[in-house]
Image (tube, grey):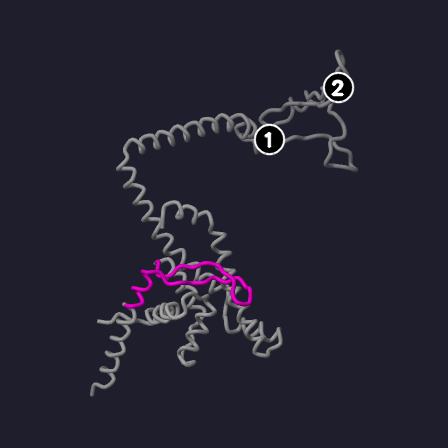
Amino acid sequence: MAKTDIQGTLDLLILKTLSQTGELHGYGIVLHIQTASAELLRVEEGSLYPALHRMEQKGWVNSQWALTETNRKAKYYKLTAVGRKQLQEAEKSFEQLVKGLRAMLRYA
Amino acid sequence: MSLLSGISNLFSRAKLAQDIDDELQAHIEMQVSDNIAAGMSSEEARRDALLKFGNVTAMKEKVTGADAALTLESLFADVRYGLRQLVRNRGFAVIAVMTLALGIGATTGIFSILNAWIIQPLPLKDPQQLVIFWRAAAASPNEPAYYFSWRDYLYFHERSHAFQSLGASFERGYALTGRGSPRVCTVG
């Protein structure tokens, strides 16, 4: 059974963003999710940063301070090997959730 | 997390908080820059960025919470690891315990001596009952102005029942001469 809740979806969005972009700061993650979802999804900063720190503690991502293109210091996050595995599981789990939801909605 | 980084984490709370602060601030600043690039005035850009971001203080607490909860968990893991290591290296454990015991014992001993000599207040049963009284001039009632005579003291000693006991003291400077240059010597 799929174990995807709201939190799991947020984690999935963040993990996927980092796997698509390589290395990114929090602000960039918000922008990327917005753009990549055709403006349909917007991640709240209030959930994003606690999630990033939680994921770093779990060892899914690691972070380091670096300069942005405009020479500003920002904390960049990057997937670890554990994070990559976690992403695969989260994607699988999400597919199942969607399938389950579809089936549920079509049930008559 | 290794034991060492766990311990250093405890000491770098302030640095961690600063780190979170910087991270969130950087986010707001990037939003401001983008807003300006999109054509807003700098004031408008900042207001919009702060509005979008929401309550910074509340968010700082949430982020710190995300860090702290897991820091505590790993602290317990470190403690368990430490205990296992102590059981494995008995000799080390014994020496460590003895070092601690001697250290604590010596410190306690030195402290009790210092405490008795220096830190403890007057060697009286109830120091809060100690009072001093003097004769003052009407113009400055808070400063002693005249000495009581020896007869005054005897009089108080005989007639006063307000005090458990009475004593007299006086203070005067004398010039001490002899070898070398004279010094003022205060006598009480």
Q: Which of marks 1 and 2 is in front?
A: 2
- Chain designation of label 2: B
* In the image, residue A83 lies in the stretch drawn in magenta: yes
Q: Which mark is residue B130?
A: 1
Name the quarter where the N terminus of chain A is drawn. bottom left
Q: Residue drawn 57% across and 28% down?
A: B122
**Amino acid at circle 2:** Arg
Measuring from the top left, give residue B72's x and y in whole percent.
37, 52
**Amino acid at circle 1:** Leu
Measuring from the top left, give residue A75's x and y in whole percent.
47, 61
Report helix, strand or loop for mark 1.
loop
Q: Quadrant of residue B102 in the image?
A: top left
Q: On the rendered structure, is B181 left or right of B120?
A: right
Image: B99 above or below A103: above
Image: B39 above or below B93: below
Image: A97 above or below B117: below
Dot 2 corresponds to which residue? B183
Report helix, strand or loop for mark 2.
strand
Measuring from the top left, give residue B2's x and y in whole percent.
36, 47
Measuring from the top left, give residue A36's x and y in whole percent.
41, 77
Q: Quadrant of residue B128 in the image?
A: top right
Q: On the rendered structure, is B42 left or right of A95?
A: right
Name the quarter where the C terminus of chain A is drawn. bottom left
Residue at the far top: name it.
B178
Q: Residue drawn 44% across and 68% down?
A: A46
Q: Residue drawn 32% across and 60% down?
A: A81
The boundaries of the magenta stretch are A59-88
Q: Quadrant of residue B153 in the image?
A: top right
Alpha carbons under labels 1 and 2: distance apart: 32 Å
Q: In this rendered view, identify the residue nearer to me: B117 or B9.
A: B9
